[in-house]
Image (spheres, rainbow, N blue to C red):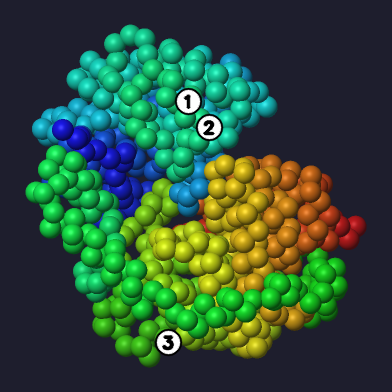
């Protein structure tokens, strides 16, 4: 008999219940116990849903209040010294301080670094380790959640991030080899497995996604030593799980380890039949298991599935001849700017007249309760188009005036009309469809609803020109037009699988190229095309990197290269290992790139030093994912670090990322400090 199971389940809730509970706790509106009760209710609902869908052994401990890597680090007491007093006194406050920073009661803590989870848009917190690190079982969350399910009559399979993957995801603060800590870490894992065994768990899932990467001898040896040690003593059966890619040449390694190895109503009826989300995928697994037992008993269901596949293959909604014709006519010259960067930089300075160390932001400003409420009322038909437009115009003008008062040099319109940086564009492009509740966690309480790219992509009409032009009409300072780049739209969507991803990306790039040219024609002299997903799209195996980077860079250049030299093209990237892609970043040939660097205290600039990045660069000087507000002196220190490795003439001053998740008081305070730091730096440079 086939056993139906799954590796994990979405934790945020169909209606983002976890997001609301966590944010309520952060804001002081929800007590800690009320937050934990909301989490327990979600876990129980999800376990029951999985059982109802036909899963025999659903996972537990795949739930997290913020991040599963942070949970694993906290569990084994990989808590840096600066957080220990708070974590010991109030574990929940200490946990969230690691994730978001803490600035209360005279205690000022920066958050841990954050980066992308393999090739996804999920962001995890990077554990900090050091030579001689000691580990202990600080938290028995995996055992508690297993017993929680068991008390409800549901047998589960606890999930643990494997010890080798946990070390691989970590960083050391003293330059030591993190894998030297394996022998200290393994006894804690062994103790946890013993506790799960004693609690009655028959199986434990150990996630080791690092097994799909290119591994050196050191990591291979770590796997052999780790699982030889964990095979000893009383423990549940181990199910080793990998995902994101094939094991490839690591198959013999994985197979040789002593474990058991495991390799929406708003949509129209036809289109809905082409999709399967979490619950539907579990039902498909149940169908396959039943077919293995007796195919005749599920013949009708299998026939319906085949019909849905054929419907999608033949649908005229998927294939558009005019889009195919435009792609076939592409010429290499379309991806080239008219002049090299030095000449463009001269012309742009003449046109924009910016001071040294120009200041700007990444794009979005706070999406307040009033903004979200107005959007919801408009969508529900309770706010007329004209009243909603008037509201957005007032918010945009307020945002422009605040930026002028703060003293920013290059402004943005605030993006109050936008729900999400990908969904907003997908709603205006042909070939996209949307769900109401297809939420995916990005980090912490931040969730997105990825669009579904089901067909050829085209732009029926301008998407952003009206709001950028309106904002520019309010000020004499340069106003950036704000777009999401083709690779990021691709990566942060559910992408059709009936043609190469490169072809879909080029289709998006051509649609954006039309938008960029329309923005320029409307008088917008600076245009930002964000590509935060460029690094996460990198294949897991190095042998596949070059081909991906070729079409990814080409797609960006296709979107950006159709403008005059005087028009300044910006891009933004965050939470990336730039050493892997620095040559490709330079090949994108954006006039200015802004990047996330504050959590690493400018460490990420090393890649730009090694490569001698030639164009403008804005290393983020404060972390917008934390409510903590740094002062001007702290930002000045970071800028001075940047000046030591980046020629001052190339340096811009900006936050790490967009400001939509922050509140106005902290946003204004932080930006005023940032502008003050830039002015001090100008004075120092002039002296």
Q: State how far apart marks 3 and 1 are (Cα).
A: 64 Å
SS at mark 3 in the image? helix
Q: Are marks 1 and 2 in contact (CB under 8 Å)?
A: yes
In the current view of this chain or complex, which residue is farthest to the top?
233
Where is the N terminus found, in terms of image quarters? top left
Residue 249's x, y, as percent?
Answer: 53, 32
Q: Residue at x 51, y 48 (%)?
A: 119
Q: Is residue 35 left or right of residue 301?
A: right
Q: Mark 3: few, some, or many residues within 10 Å (few <14, many ≥20)?
A: few
User: Label 1: which residue?
Assistant: 252
- Depth order, front residue of 19/318: 318
Q: Quadrant of residue 69?
A: top left
- Depth order, front residue of 308/679: 308
Q: Are marks 3 and 1 in contact (CB under 8 Å)?
A: no
Q: Which mark is residue 249?
A: 2
Q: Is residue 83 above or below residue 359?
A: above
- Depth order, front residue of 649/311: 311
Q: Is residue 308 left or right of residue 622?
A: left
In the current view of this chain or complex, which residue is farthest to the bottom?
386
Q: Is residue 617 above or below residue 328?
A: above
User: Label 3: which residue?
Assistant: 390
Q: State how far apart marks 3 and 2 are (Cα).
A: 60 Å
């Amino acid at each position: 008999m086939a056993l139906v199971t799954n590796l994990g389940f979405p934790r945020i809730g169909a209606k983002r219940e976890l997001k609301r509970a966590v944010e309520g706790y952060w804001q002081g509106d929800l007590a800690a116990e009320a937050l934990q009760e909301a989490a327990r209710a979600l876990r129980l609902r999800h376990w029951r849903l999985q059982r109802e869908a036909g899963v025999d052994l659903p996972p537990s401990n795949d739930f997290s209040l913020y991040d599963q890597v942070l949970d694993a680090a906290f569990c084994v007491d990989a808590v840096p010294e600066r957080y220990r007093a708070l974590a010991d006194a109030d574990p929940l406050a200490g946990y969230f301080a690691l994730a978001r920073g803490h600035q209360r009661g005279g205690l000022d803590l920066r958050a841990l670094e954050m980066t992308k989870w393999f090739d996804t848009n999920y962001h995890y917190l990077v554990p900090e380790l050091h030579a001689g690190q000691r580990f202990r079982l600080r938290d028995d969350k995996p055992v508690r959640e297993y017993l929680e399910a068991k008390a409800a009559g549901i047998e589960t399979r606890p999930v643990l991030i494997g010890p080798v993957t946990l070390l691989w995801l970590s960083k050391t603060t003293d330059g030591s080899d993190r894998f030297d800590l394996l022998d200290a870490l393994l006894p804690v894992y062994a103790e946890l497995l013993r506790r799960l065994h004693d609690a009655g768990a028959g199986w434990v899932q150990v996630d080791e996604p690092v097994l799909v990467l290119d591994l050196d001898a050191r990591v291979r040896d770590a796997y052999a030593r780790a699982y030889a040690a964990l095979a000893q003593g009383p423990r549940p059966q181990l199910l080793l799980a990998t995902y994101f890619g094939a094991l490839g040449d690591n198959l013999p390694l994985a197979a040789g380890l002593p474990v058991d190895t495991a390799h929406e109503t708003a949509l129209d009826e036809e289109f809905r039949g082409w999709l399967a989300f979490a619950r539907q995928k579990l039902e498909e697994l149940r169908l396959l298991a039943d077919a293995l037992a007796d195919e005749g008993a599920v013949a009708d269901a299998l026939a319906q599935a085949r019909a849905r596949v054929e419907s999608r293959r033949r649908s005229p909604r998927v294939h558009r001849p005019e889009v195919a014709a435009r792609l076939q006519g592409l010429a290499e010259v379309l991806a080239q700017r008219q002049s090299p960067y030095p000449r463009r930089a001269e012309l742009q300075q003449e046109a924009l007249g910016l001071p040294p160390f120009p200041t700007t932001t990444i794009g979005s400003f706070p999406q307040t309760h009033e903004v979200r409420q107005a959007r919801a009322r408009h969508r529900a038909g309770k706010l007329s188009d004209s009243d909603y437009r008037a509201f957005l115009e007032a918010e945009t003008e307020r945002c422009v005036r605040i930026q002028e008062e703060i003293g920013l040099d290059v402004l943005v319109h605030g993006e109050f009309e936008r729900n999400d940086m990908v969904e907003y564009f997908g709603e205006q492009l042909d070939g996209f469809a949307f769900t109401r509740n297809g939420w995916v966690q990005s980090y912490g309480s931040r969730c997105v609803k990825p669009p579904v790219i089901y067909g050829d992509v085209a732009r029926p009409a301008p998407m952003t020109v009206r709001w950028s032009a309106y904002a520019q009409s309010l000020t004499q300072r340069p106003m950036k037009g704000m777009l999401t780049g083709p690779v990021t739209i691709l990566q942060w969507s559910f992408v059709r699988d009936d043609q190469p991803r490169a072809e879909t990306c080029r289709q998006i790039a051509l649609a954006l190229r039309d938008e960029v040219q329309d923005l320029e024609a409307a008088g917008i002299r600076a245009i930002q095309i964000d590509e935060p997903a460029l690094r996460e799209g990198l294949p897991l195996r190095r042998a596949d990197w070059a081909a991906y980077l070729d079409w990814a860079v080409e797609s960006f250049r296709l979107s950006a290269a159709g403008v005059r030299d005087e028009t300044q093209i910006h891009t933004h990237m965050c939470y990336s290992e730039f050493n892997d892609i620095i040559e490709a970043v330079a090949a994108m040939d954006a006039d200015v790139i802004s990047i996330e660097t504050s959590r690493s205290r400018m460490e990420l600039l090393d890649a730009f030093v090694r490569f001698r990045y030639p164009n403008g660069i804005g290393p983020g000087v404060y972390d917008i994912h934390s409510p903590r507000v740094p002062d001007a002196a702290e930002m000045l220190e970071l800028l001075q670090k940047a000046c030591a490795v980046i020629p001052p003439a190339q340096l811009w001053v900006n936050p790490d990322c967009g400001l939509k998740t922050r509140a106005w008081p902290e946003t204004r305070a932080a930006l005023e400090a940032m502008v003050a730091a830039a002015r001090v730096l100008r004075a120092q440079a002039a002296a």
